[in-house]
Amino acid sequence: MIWNETIECMEREEMRKLQGIRLKRVVEHAYYNTPFYRRKMQEEGLSPDDIESIDDITKLPFTVKQDLRDTYPFGLMAVPMSEIVRLHASSGTTGKPVVVGYTRKDLSIWSEAVARCLYAVGLTRNDAVQVSYGYGLFTGGLGLHGGVEKIGGTVIPMSSGNTQKQIQLMHDFGAKALACTPSYALYLGETIKESGIPREEFQLKTGIFGAEPWTESMRREIEESLGIKAYDIYGLTEIIGPGVGSECECQKGTHLWEDHFFPEIIDPKTLLPVAPGEPGELVFTTLTKEGMPMIRYRTRDLTALHHEKCGCGRTAVRMDRILGRSDDMLIIRGVNVFPSQVEAVILGLPEFEPHYLIVVDRVNNTDTFQIQVEVRPDYYSDEINKVMALKKKITMQMQSVIGIQPEIKIVEPRSIERSMGKAQHVIDNRKLV
Ligand code: DLL
């Protein structure tokens, strides 16, 4: 099923024309309404008149996460704040979140994009969708919510957590689809098994999973344990949230809604476009967003794009699974975590040495997140109370900066291996890619 056939199946040449017209418009909008973009373009000797077609996109400078941090909170808004009807945010590297603002039109583009995803995975107005992504500043919950309402389906706005209740209501309300992170889906599958409620009593048939990397073997595990078909949905806060694209029933890659979010793949080292079909870093330009347009935003996600028509009839470009990242960001239980955040907290506490190790694993389908830190000899003690107080102090600071609670393991002075070259601060045992 196709939500917007005219767009999703548009011939490539026609699509490129549309993208060119929209690019010109968004560049003008950003140039005249955002000092940041004007300055960056002027530095390159560019004006909006230099943009005639979508091919001219490569003339434009890139935007990176640091730019959003430097202009925190509202420096990249291209409309007066009176036009902004919603704010969302995701964690950044310094504890300051990345903030995005939506106009009323942006929200409608967002729900249109998610509606396309839901149709692509076979959902309609007859289906109830349990939205178990977090609601709040995170875009997952409200993003999916808007799309389900758009197609006229029934939203069950559960948010994440409270697993027993999730299962009970999924059963009682007859949810046809579940939208959450793939790791939470696995956990829900296990909990359903333990609950003793027969699986046949659930009406669940479809999963819409994303917000973190996952693999084909995880897909099989989820499909097996929940008895459903599991689909990948992709998105990021800076561009709009979930629904930048999703798989269709052919599951041959993630269709990107390129009339709104124009994708490019560049070599992260040379910053030049790669050959068609080659992997590299994904870059997006929002072609229609008003509130906070993003021009050539470097996602740091590594993938490849394919332009051949899909078996489903869509011509919308397809993206491979995210292969990894070109920076060191980790996604732990759906939360973006940068090792530099951990480091900043440790360096700010006089009791600890500046040596640490982050150990991430997946146990019972849930991410575990441990930080090992060394106590300075003057603070080292055998007394359990003192150790507990230190642990509590650092745990609370980590939680407030990162947004999730790590398990802190305080180790003896000089027990973390010193490195001769680049220090390895992260051990990720999840083996996702
Ligand atoms: O995770 C938006 C979202 C919510 C997407 C719900 C899908 C479902 P952020 O918190 O800004 O936004 O994180 C964005 O998460 O750059 C990728 O690295 C990663 N990511 C998102 N979806 C996928 C996916 C949301 N399907 C960052 N596969 C992105 C792999 C994903 N990685």
Image (cartoon, rainbow, N blue to C red):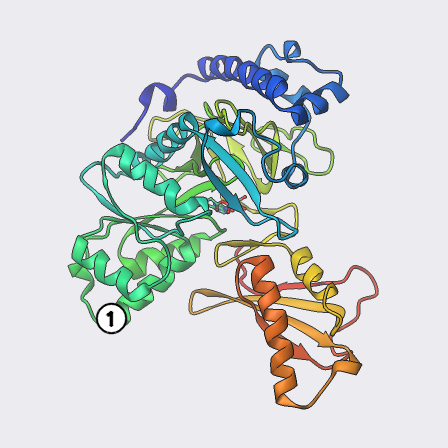
Quarter of the picture holding the C terminus:
bottom right
**Residues packed near mark 1 inside 10 Å, few (<14), some (14 to 19) or many (20 plus):** few
Mark 1 C-beta to ligand 1 under 8 Å: no
Q: Position of residue 116 (x, y in %)?
A: 34, 32
| Image quadrant where residue 122 sits | top left
Q: Which residue is the site of mark 1?
A: 195
**Residue at the spot 67% in from the left edge and 30% down from the top edge:** 62
> What's the amino acid at mark 1?
Ser
**Residue at the spot 51% in from the left edge and 16% down from the top edge:** 22
- The residue at the far front in this view is 82
Is residue 42 found left or right of 115 in the rendered image? right
| Image quadrant where residue 342 sits | bottom right
Q: Position of residue 203 (x, y in %)?
A: 19, 53
- Viewer-proximal residue, 293 or 188? 293
Q: Position of residue 408 (x, y in %)?
A: 60, 73
Residue 167, relative to residue 138: is it above or below? below
